[in-house]
Amino acid sequence: MTGVLIGIGAGFIALFVILGIGVIALIYFVVRWVIKAHQAQVGAGREEMVGRTAVVKQALNPRGTVLIEGERWEAESEEGRMKVGEEVVVSRVEGLRVYVTKKQ
């Protein structure tokens, strides 16, 4: 009977060691992911918009709308009329309106 208990005890110890290593590995990867998330820079300010490429969705004559990374923005052309589908570059931002120039 003592031999059976020793066999079961060794199995439990091995199970706890394996689970412990798994938990430590999980904690390591979660902490690493959290640190990377905190170090990543968030780009949401108007400085981040300048220089980005947009696609004209409503003709700019001189005002219309553009799509910047999936978001629709009110826009004003600084270089005359721009057609739907044309690529433009954001040159400045004022309030909720972007000012664009033709992409070179």
Image: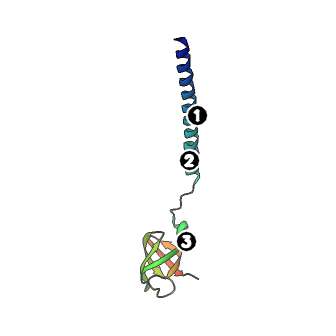
Q: Position of residue 80 (x, y in %)?
A: 48, 88
Marks 2 and 3, how far apart at CA? 30 Å
Mark 2 crowd level (few <14, some 14–19, many ≥20, 10 Å Cα): few
Q: Position of residue 45 (x, y in %)?
A: 51, 63
Label 2 belongs to which residue? 33
Q: Considering the image in quadrants, where does the C terminus appear?
A: bottom right
Label 3 belongs to which residue? 50
Identify the element where label 3 is drawn: loop
Relative to the observer, which residue lies in front, 23 or 19?
19
Rendered position, 12 above or below 93: above
Name the mark nearer the viewer: 3 or 1: 1
Q: Amino acid at mark 1?
A: Ile
Label 1 belongs to which residue? 21
Marks 2 and 1, how far apart at CA? 18 Å
Specify whether 77 is left or right of 40. Answer: left
Rendered position, 48 above or below 104: above
Relative to the observer, which residue lies in front, 64 or 67?
67
Relative to the observer, which residue lies in front, 28 or 17?
17
Tell me whether the residue at label 2 lies in contact with that at label 1, contact meaning CB atoms closer than 8 angstroms. no
Q: Quadrant of residue 60?
A: bottom left
- The residue located at (51%, 67%) in the rendering is 46
- The residue located at (55%, 40%) in the rendering is 26
Q: Amino acid at mark 2?
A: Trp
Q: Amino acid at mark 3?
A: Val
Identify the element where label 1 is drawn: helix
